[in-house]
Amino acid sequence: MEHQKCYVFNRQGGRPAKKRRLNNSNLPSSWPLRETTYNELWAAQEKRINDVLSEVNKATTGEITAFVSAAATESRTSACRIPTGLVVAGPSIASHRTLFEHLGRDIVTQTRSAFVLLTSAECPNLKTLLKDLIKNATARSTEDDEDDEVAGNASQKGPKLLNYDLQLLYLWFRIQNLDQVVVAFQDSEAFDGSLLGEAIELFKFWSDRVPFVLLFGIATTVETLENKLPRSAKRCIEGQKFDVTQADKVLERVFHAAIDGDDVPLRLGPSLSTQLLDRQKDHVQSVDAFIEGLKYAYMSHFYANPLSLLLRQDIRYEQLSSDDIEAVRNLDSFRQLAERLLDDGEAALVRYLLESDIVLFKNVKEQLEEGQLRISNMVKAIETLYALRRCSPKMPIIPRSSLYVRAVSGELNGSPAVRELLLSVKKASSDILVQILDALLASTPEDALSIMLSLRERLVALMESNEDSSTPLRSEHDLRNETFRTTIVAQKVELSKQKSALSKKDAAYSKLVDECHSRLEAYFAEMFINPQELFLHEIFLYDLKSPHKDAFTPRPRYAVERALSAPQDYLGCDCCHSAAGSDGTESTLSSTQPSTAILYQLYLESGSLINVSDLWSAFQAIMVDDDDEQSLTMALFQRALAELRCLGLIKSSRKKTDHVAKLAWKGL
């Protein structure tokens, strides 16, 4: 078992291979068109997300690339220090690799440099670090075959070089005619300090022949890395700090790109959005994992919901089947629509929708566009609320993702977040109100733009007419315009509020503030609707939680244990069911079951150390094969034992060579 890694045998007769085939005959006929729709819509969505990702760290990557390019033009001597970039990428370790991969592509394309990315898991010691450095640098392209031969021939003139000798890198660097070699330590804080110190000193020794540029990915602070490095290594480098946009801000921008825009046909519901965001925070995953989850949501919606075909802009009535039309009538939102129409006395329209497929199709197209427009307006109102809250200096900032989750849940209208903003608008001074109106002008639709411009012009006129320009105008709702009066009644002290006398300018300003407050209140009340009450929200709002729960929080151990314990549930066959014993009782083992499942049942009945010879005897007794097929039975046994070892259930025992150690118990 130790010296053999694979077993190949030919099955001769016996039971058939157990493979469950997927029956595609039950899939709706609209699946090919839905697949095309999914590919088109996701391609547009992915382009928006990629544009955001390319812009997020564009400034930082540009600065680092310029730093590397400037280092290439400097003359190097043995006394010069190694140029070093300290990239503070934040605590999200999962996003560091994506950042350095983008950075490596920019450096290779914009400069004449070789880029090598090293991680702590791949470099436990200095020898392995140098091996990976030389290997990754010399394998930078597939067109270096001839160059490798030249380097090999050059090294053969003298003594044979070891694979961790930097002389190999020097020979390759000279043949490639490059300017420098950029070495990036992705998780520098996970490296051992002495290892980094030895590597830096060695690079400094070779810097007059191979110009190096070092990049350190830092998750905490620069001081942490500085304290880890030896003093001799710190004398060899000259660092420059670069701050990278934090992962949570990148996630917010990617999430905003996924929901914002008039051309976004499908948006996530509250439960699925919460699950995706909590998964990112709890497991500290990269933004790529969030994008994959969003893509999985699109795939699930278009595969599981035949009515997702209606998201096509050019859909025609002839492309729908009668079952699709009937499915619309079975939606919960259609029943709610019918009830509202009956309450409004439009029974004739309900009859047309129930009897005429063409009338229903036209109504669905109109209502679908209207529903998507209302969701789009709600997202714009969320952006307005977010921008206005940032204008108030003492108001806590709520992420746009949290506001979106509350909005699609129908909880944002009249919520504390909105009431707090409206109250701050009432008490805002003139200098704060100007910022609020400027933020409103940036997000106000064209039909209401003239109203906002009129309010701002009136406010500017009041501010210019104010004689004391250093003191802003304040409304009657401001606390500074309220006084407290103390009265004694029946030996009891009573406090009462009293409005101070306002000047004409403050009174005019108070009127303007009240008008702005009332318009904002009406705008939020109109925009922040409950999407669950919209007709056809099941089509343009995806909130099916069940497939994502198993995909995002899987239980692989439970699934493996259940598959080995009850293989018939997964294979869908009758031959794997439990057989009857000689005494009439049910036996859990049968020769028709897969060999790995049989061996797993015997494994459960064993102790912490399992005698392989006894295990083979029991397995052979269950299979009840003839002596002629003993070699086939042995092959099945060895393959099953190898699969249990691959699953991490057993390992070789050093105490007894003919035993294996049990590593896991069922249910623990």
Image (cartoon, rainbow, N blue to C red):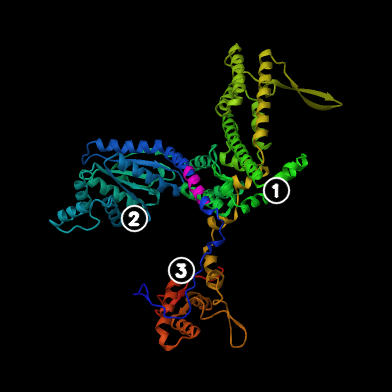
Residue 472 in the image: x percent, y percent? Answer: 60, 18
Q: Is residue 295 magenta?
A: no
Residue that mark 1 sits on: 355
Where disc 1 sits, the SS reads helix
Q: Nearer the viewer, mark 3 or mark 1?
A: 1
Residue 228's place in the image compared with 13, above or below, is above
Question: What is the C-alpha distance between the residues marked 3 and 1?
Answer: 61 Å
Residue 458's place in the image compared with 544, above or below, is above
Residue 323 in the image: x percent, y percent? Answer: 62, 54
How many labels were placed on the picture? 3
The local crowd at label 3, few if under 14, some if 14 to 19, many if 20 or more residues have their Cα within 10 Å, is: few
Q: Amino acid at mark 3?
A: Gly
Residue 579 in the image: x percent, y percent? Answer: 57, 81
Residue 202's place in the image compared with 19, above or below, is above
Q: Residue at x 68, y 26 (%)?
A: 518
Q: Residue at x 68, y 43 (%)?
A: 533
Residue that mark 3 sits on: 648
The local crowd at label 1, few if under 14, some if 14 to 19, many if 20 or more residues have their Cα within 10 Å, is: few
Give the dominant element type of the magenta stretch: helix, strand or loop. helix
User: Earlier along the polypeptide chain: callout 2 or callout 1?
Assistant: 2
Where disc 2 sits, the SS reads loop
Closest to the observer: 10 or 521? 10
**Image quadrant occupied by the C terminus:** bottom right
The magenta region covers: 34-44
